[in-house]
Image: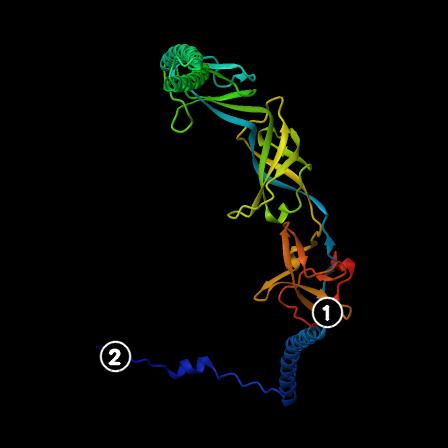
Amino acid sequence: MNEHTLTIDADTIDDIGDPAPVPNVPAWKLAFLIVALTGMIVAAFFVGWLPKTHRQQALVETVQRQKEMLPIVEIVLPKPAMETVEVTFPGEIEALEETVIYARTSGYLKRWHVDIGDTVQQGQLLAEIDTPEVDQQLQQALANVEQLKARRQVAETKLGLTRYTLTRLDELLQSQAASRQEYDESQAEFAVAEHQVKVADADIAAGMAELQRIKELQSFAKVYAPFAGTITERSIDLGQLVTAGSGQAQSLFRLVSTDRVRGVVHVPQIYAFNIEPGEQAQLLVREMADRTFVGEVARTARSLDLQTRTMRIEIEFDNSDGQLLPGAYVQVRLPVRRPNPPMLIPASALIFNASGSQIATVNAENLVELRAVDVDADYGNVLGIATGIESTDRIVVNPGERLVGGMSVTIAEPDAAG
């Protein structure tokens, strides 16, 4: 590896010259510079530290004042609710009269005169039934009655003969031409003949009753409307077998009377005690929002259902125009009187904790009192209180969790309270 040697001649050194002399700073200037720097550092410290200290001190003082300051609360006086309120209940429309029509005689449907949707009058013919068996029974009953009448004639003829024989034997007995035994036998035959006539009369009466029964049964071959109304169902066709009765038998028609209808509602227990017959009610139908039907409470069940704790209420409405359809869902608005209306307070005033439902009140010494209350109803932003407060109590609107019983508070000014 080659080595290089740097060689500087003496002449070159002479060309560079001597180094510059070190400056000589006076002591007083150095001291002034140090003092100035120190002053600047101290000034910067106080400029940054003192305001922060003042802010911290002010914050401490503010916190202390807040600790010593009494809580400011907004109060309100409870208001009694109206004695009569309108409450809307769900309900349904029922026909005032409704029946399912069955046949009262057996046979085959011969003809029907009405169909679904037809309006009928009371006593109008609805259907005809062909009853061949009943017709045969009628002929047999007629023949049986004639037979019984003939038997009575025989018994009556026999009675006349025994009466004549008894009369002759009585005359012969007077002249001793006949024995006493013959007379007694004739008298017994006469009594038997009398009883036979009575039996024949009873048989005829029974035969006539059976004949009348079959005639009535035959008259049921024509089915009539029991009342005026509308046919809402026809469940039989021509030629179909008809069986008498209403157990397993096939029904013929369903008839409803729609001139007047009733709205049926089930009122909760809280309102049930204050609804009486005769009160007016309004019926609201969603499909006819522009119309209100007015009716009257006709009857109440006066008993609560054990399962739902509700009472059945029936309101009658005029439906001469047929707008209200049985089976429709409706809403019924009822005026409900309350003997002891609840006190109304803001919903925000209610305290609900482990102790139950409470409210905070402020007494005359501006001390907080916590009271247990019973909530009667929830109206959204307003609550109805049944017991626990009076109309003169000052209720704290927003108590929160900061208030405890016995705490001193300051009442907010009306302007501050809004």
Q: Nearer the viewer, residue 131 or 188?
A: 188
Q: Nearer the viewer, residue 202 or 266?
A: 202
Name the residue tied to disc 2.
3
| Helix, strand or loop for disc 1 | loop
Circle on res. 246: none
Q: Is 262 positioned to the left or the right of 109 in the image?
A: right
Amino acid carrying mark 1 in the image: Val
| Helix, strand or loop for disc 2 | loop
Can you see residue 207? no
Q: Residue at x 66, y 59 (%)?
A: 349
Q: Residue at x 62, y 21 (%)?
A: 321
Can you see residue 53? yes
Please rate how many residues cluster around mark 2, counting C-alpha atoms within 10 Å: few if below 14, some from 14 to 19, many from 20.
few
Q: Nearer the viewer, residue 186 or 225?
A: 186
Amino acid carrying mark 2 in the image: Glu
User: Residue 327 in the image: x percent, y percent?
Assistant: 52, 30
Name the residue tied to disc 1.
409
Q: Mark 1 touching mark 2, by CB under 8 A?
A: no
Numbered circles on residues, count: 2
Quadrant the C terminus occupies: bottom right
User: Residue 115 in the image: x percent, y percent?
Assistant: 47, 16
Q: Nearer the viewer, residue 154 or 134?
A: 154
Can you tell which quarter of the image residue 36 is in? bottom right
Depicted 99 relative to depicted 386: above or below = above
Please rate how many residues cluster around mark 1, counting C-alpha atoms within 10 Å: few if below 14, some from 14 to 19, many from 20.
some
User: Residue 83 in the image: x percent, y percent?
Assistant: 72, 47
Q: Is 406 positioned to the left or the right of 180 in the image?
A: right
Q: Is 241 positioned to the left or the right of 277 in the image?
A: left
First along the sequence among labels 1 and 2: 2
